[in-house]
Image (cartoon, grey):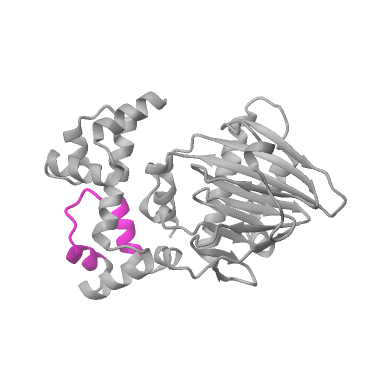
Amino acid sequence: MADLLSELLTPMRLRGVFHSSWSLRAPWGVVGEREDCAILHYVQRGSCVVELAPGDPLCVVAGDDCGPRHGEPVRLGAGDLAIFPHGVSHRLADRAGQVTVPLAQVLPDREPGAVRALRIDGPGEATELLCGGLHYEPLAAAPLYRALPELIVLEREVVERQPLLAGTLEQLGEQWAEDRPGAALVALRAFELIFILALRAALEERDVPVLRALRHPAIGKALLAVHTRFAEPWTLESMAAEAGMSRSAFASGFRELVGEPPMQHLAARRMQEAARLLVETGLSHGRIAERVGYGSDVGFHLAFRAWSGGTPGQYRRSALIGK
């Protein structure tokens, strides 16, 4: 599982973290739009309610009250950690249904590397949050990463069972505003560590399809092979053999746990690696096609266009302009 988790996160190329400290007194409510980053909210004191938009994919709660929750508000208490792997739009408030203001209004210019403080005064109970937005290139996210739930919540007791996670959160909470040399890099690495440790804890705690896939002794073995040896000439039969399963049982089990057919997942993994090579190297399109398992430029170009909406050349030029 650990190796597959590394393969899941390594290609994402985190570009920076925006982090903020929130000091709030009820009544209060903030709504954030979807962002191209993973978002973390850690409740240091008090409590709050998280609400996703109606129809958003499941929420996972890890702790004594575990289980998938569809569309219902989730209350976070002191010591709870909420992870939004895809930066989905969500509401944070002192209670469900509270009137909210846009996050961009109270925390403008949330650029990677910036540090902000948010304070909302009121007559009610106090809540303190530590928040971070880990920015990454969305197309660089592994197929399995994109299949993660919109929201994963680790309750306090789960966090406390992970000493390194709990200790990092505590230390970051004490030092978040310190203006010392290397502070931005320290914050990035701290939030990156928190993110990885939180996902690892979720893998250990939760029985959710895509997380079960990483732990499944057969499907997990095939997934690791596909994610690390994607250039090989895989077929459904050879993947099933890698897993030690029959073709039909493997195809059915893979789709149930991962959420898509094996060959579609393989194609997405190849395109993810191609996108990385286009941005990080000067390799020709033909060499990249070979590196990711395509025997012809034409097949590679067609697959890449279907995956990204543009040609490899367009993707490379766009990435270079954005640097």
Q: Position of residue 52 (x, y in %)?
A: 57, 57
In the figure, 311 relative to 9: above or below?
above
Residue 246, visible in the rendered structure: no
Q: Looking at this view, is 226 or 65 the one in front?
A: 65
Kindly identify the residue that appears in the image at 52 percent across and 46 percent down. Answer: 34
Q: Position of residue 249 (x, y in %)?
A: 26, 75
Q: Position of residue 73 (x, y in %)?
A: 64, 63
In the image, is residue 224 part of the stretch drawn in magenta?
A: yes
Compared across the picture, whether 75 is left or right of 313 comes to right
Q: Position of residue 92 (x, y in %)?
A: 67, 52
Q: Specify the quadrant that holds the C terminus.
A: top left
In the image, is residue 49 part of the stretch drawn in magenta?
A: no
Magenta portion: prevailing SS class: helix
Compared across the picture, whether 273 is left or right of 31 comes to left
Magenta region, residue range: 220-242
Q: Looking at this view, is 94 or 267 the one in front?
A: 94
Kindly identify the residue that appears in the image at 64 percent across and 63 percent down. Answer: 74
In the figure, 81 relative to 191: above or below?
below
Kindly identify the residue that appears in the image at 63 percent across and 48 percent down. Answer: 31
Dividing the picture into quarters, in which one does residue 46 lie? Answer: bottom right
In the figure, 201 relative to 297: above or below?
below
Compared across the picture, whether 33 is left or right of 273 comes to right
Q: Looking at this view, is 188 or 136 the one in front?
A: 136
Kindly identify the residue that appears in the image at 26 percent across and 69 percent down. Answer: 251
Residue 5, visible in the rendered structure: yes
